[in-house]
Amino acid sequence: MEDELINPFLSLRLRNGLTLGELAAYSKIDIRALARAEAGLYTNPLPGLVDYWVRRGDISEGVLVSEYEDFQIGVRRHNRLLFGPMLQFDLLSNIHPLRQLRASKGYKLVELCKALCIPLDTVQYFGKKWRLQQSVPKGLLLALNQAGYSRLQLTEFQQSYNKWRAAQSKVTFS
């Protein structure tokens, strides 16, 4: 990346010379949750982590939240059109559309979440609970839009997902 994108939470931790383990102990936040926050994998930053850094006096809440959002947008823009110029997948396949897109570019699940700064549970639920998940998650659509896909492309992706889902339901219940 030309201008190295750095998550404000990672920057604060490093600037204060803390390991993830030390920060977990001081903030009383699980180390895995801290690692996800530093990767931008939460829609909104963890309130407890924001409070920790604000209480220390290192940064204001508004600046920290704004910098977190800027980091996420920057990562998404850096990963422009990460699935290629189109969001196309095989409607006849029994493989979930997002899994097809991931496989076409060799993205593992967590790798994709980091590339789009989206929560892991959002992607997992979308992929595993397609019978319940009637539409493409808004957070995923926003991330894809910020990664360069147009509204028209996203609308077409949603419509294709709905067709795929309907076709799967017919196969499942036949």
Image: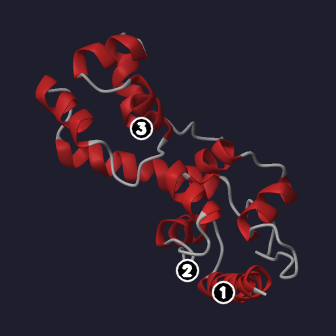
Q: Report which quarter residue 152 is drawn in.
A: bottom right
- Tell me where residue 53 appears, x and y as whole percent: 21, 29
Residue identifier under label 2: 135
Labelled pair 2, 1 in contact (Cβ < 8 Å): yes
Q: Are marks 1 and 3 in contact (CB under 8 Å)?
A: no
Q: From mark 2 to mark 1, how far is it between C-alphas?
A: 7 Å
Q: CA distance from mark 1 to mark 3?
A: 32 Å
The answer to which of 85 and 20 lies nearer the viewer is 20
Q: Secondary structure at mark 2?
A: loop
Residue at x 20%, y 49% (from the top left corner): 62
Residue beneath disc 3: 37
- Check if mark 2's residue and mark 3's residue have beta carbons within 8 Å: no
- Name the secondary structure under disc 1: helix
What is the number of the mark on residue 162? 1
Please identify the quadrant where the C terminus is shown.
bottom right
Q: Position of residue 130 (x, y in %)?
A: 62, 71
